[in-house]
Amino acid sequence: MTESLNQSLLTLALDIAKTTSEILVNQRPENMEVESKSTPVDLVTEMDKAAEIHIVKRVKAVRPNDSFLGEEGTALPPDNPSNVKWIIDPIDGTVNYFYNHPYWAISIGVEVDGEIQIGVVAAPLLHETFYAIKGGGAYVLHDGMKKKLKTNSGATIDKALVATGFGYDPERRKKQGALLAELVTIARDTRRAGAAALDFCYVASGRLDAYYEFGLYPWDLAAGSLIVTEAGGKVGGLNGDKLGGDWSLAANADLFDEIDQIVYKLSQKYFN
């Protein structure tokens, strides 16, 4: 029963990601500065909410008793909730979306009985959809072509490409920048692209060796974290903490412990 349920949830999530992608690409104003009624940020928020409403409506049309946890908070809890919860970020990488930078995505994680079973991350402008089903591996669809995902292996920190992200609070950014300034002298190189869900997927695909960030929310990591583990990688907090605490870390399995301790040591220096 669980296997058939998971397969039906994956099919639904992939289809919803596709239709949401079409809305966000086709209905995005060409000039957001001109089209915005108040500020450009407000217009992005409007697109965020419209996308989340679309996702919720699509799910409720076929699964009216499922619950939701979304960045925009548009869904009310059902009267008789099922054991399925959809954890959604309609636009992960909103600043990139505003600038029409292609590195943004729709992130859909599906939890069954409290455990993530489905992860879908669609990047419309990159023509890629990453997805995973618990116990079934992780894959990417690129222009309709399906490829199995596998993390890198064997890297040490001096040969690792490491990604991170920054929050919006200036004081937090100052600390994150100071930590990164030290890490960049240890790692092969670093990246900051601006969409957490895609950073997880890039670890899963071997385009990154590791990714860490402070202050992620459940909708930032629900789908991407499953995609990483199903591709053979590891996820968690720092120094044995669980994923979803203050810190989030994803890496190939060989590198995880080393970068965990490096980032943990630096976090103690700058965040305590």
Image (cartoon, grey):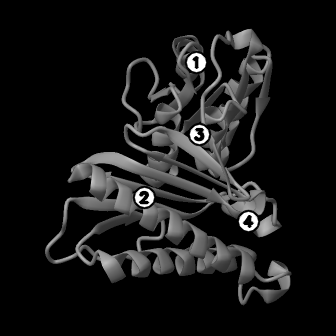
Quickly name the residue at label 2.
Answer: 10
Q: Estimate the x, y position of residue 72 in percent, counting from the top left.
A: 47, 70
Along the viewing direction, whichever of 201 and 96 lies nearer the viewer = 201
Residue at (74% x, 54% y) in the render: 103
Q: Is residue 8 left or right of residue 205?
A: left
Q: Is residue 155 above or below residue 226?
A: above
Q: Quadrant of residue 207?
A: top right
Q: Residue at x 75, y 60 (%)?
A: 96
Q: Element at badge 1?
A: helix
Amino acid type at image mark 2: Leu
Mark before the other along the chain sequence, 1 or 3: 3
Q: Give the residue type at disc 4.
A: Tyr
Give the side of residue 9 with respect to residue 149, left or right: left
The residue tagged 1 is 269
Q: How far apart are the alpha carbons under marks 1 and 3?
A: 25 Å
Q: Is residue 128 above or below residue 11?
A: above
Give the number of the disc on residue 200.
Answer: 3
Distance, label 2 to label 1, CA atoms, is 42 Å
Is 115 positioned to the left or the right of 245 in the image? left
**2 and 3 marks in contact (CB < 8 Å):** no
- Distance of label 4 from label 1 (alpha carbons): 34 Å
Please report whichever mark, 2 or 1, sits nearer to the chain's N-terminal start: 2
Question: Badges 3 and 4: C-beta atoms under 8 Å apart?
Answer: no
Residue 42 shows in this picture: no
Q: Which residue is mark 4?
A: 97
